[in-house]
Amino acid sequence: MNKNRLSKTIAAGLNLQMTNEAHASQIYLSYGAWADNYGFVGVANFLFRHAEEERNHMMKIVEYILKRGAEVHITSIPAPPEKPENINNCFQAIFKHEVENTQEIYKLVKMSLDEEDWATWNFMQWFVKEQVEEETMVLNLLNKIKIAGGEKMNGNDLYVFDKDLEKTTDEARSAIDVTAVNP
Ligand code: FEO
């Protein structure tokens, strides 16, 4: 009996998105290490925690593919882009990446709609909602950076911004508490 409940196209799309989420995790990890090197402890903590969150997104897709009886294909993960030039550039790059990820998610939603795969369509709605939250979160940080002077932020501005992120750490969802079921 064939237990596979995903079409070839949907399974390929989900496998691709699984790697996209792993790629997103590597980006946050790489930028977090960059921030830590420059002493931005608050920014680094925020980015490291988000790297974990992206990995949880990846696991959520792995679990769904398996639950639907299809095969998971683990491939190499593309390298993250170049290190950012400054804090403003770092969050601009993150926002751009989140928007690109949203577009990939929309492709999967469209694919599931076209194939009338309502289970996958329903599964993907969680990601649609999550992307709205993530884009808003990064946009809010970009607004703070803009108010503080954007590219022209001085040492004091950067210190305050970093402290601000450090302070919000405990209030934000901790990766430790996050599961693949509830990322
Ligand atoms: Fe898993 Fe930031 O998207």
Image (tube, rainbow, N blue to C red):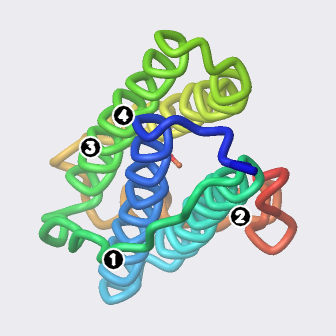
Eye-nearest disc, 3 or 1: 1
- Mark 4 vs mark 3: which is more N-terminal? 3
Q: Which residue is identified by label 2?
A: 169
Contact, CB < 8 Å: mark 4 with mark 1? no
Q: Is residue 123 above or below residue 40?
A: above
Identify the element where label 3 is drawn. helix
**Foreground pick, 94 / 131:** 131
**Foreground pick, 87 / 20:** 20
Disc 3 and disc 1: Cα gap in Å? 15 Å
Contact, CB < 8 Å: mark 3 with mark 1? no
Contact, CB < 8 Å: mark 2 with mark 4? no
Identify the element where label 2 is drawn. loop
Identify the element where label 1 is drawn. helix
- Mark 4 vs mark 1: which is more N-terminal? 1
Q: Which residue is identified by label 3?
A: 92
Disc 2 and disc 3: Cα gap in Å? 20 Å
Q: Would you identify the image quadrant in which residue 124 lies? A: top right
- Mark 2 vs mark 3: which is more N-terminal? 3
The residue depicted at 21 percent of the width and 73 percent of the height is 79
Disc 4 and disc 1: Cα gap in Å? 22 Å
User: In the orientation shown, which residue stands out farthest toward the front?
Assistant: 1
Residue 24 coordinates in the image, percent (x, y) = 40, 59
- Mark 1 vs mark 2: which is more N-terminal? 1
Q: Which residue is identified by label 4?
A: 104
Disc 1 and disc 2: Cα gap in Å? 19 Å
- Mark 2 vs mark 4: which is more N-terminal? 4
Q: Which residue is identified by label 1?
A: 30
Mark 3 Cβ inside 8 Å of ligand 1: no
Eye-nearest disc, 4 or 1: 4
For the residue marked with disc 4, what is the amino acid? Answer: Glu
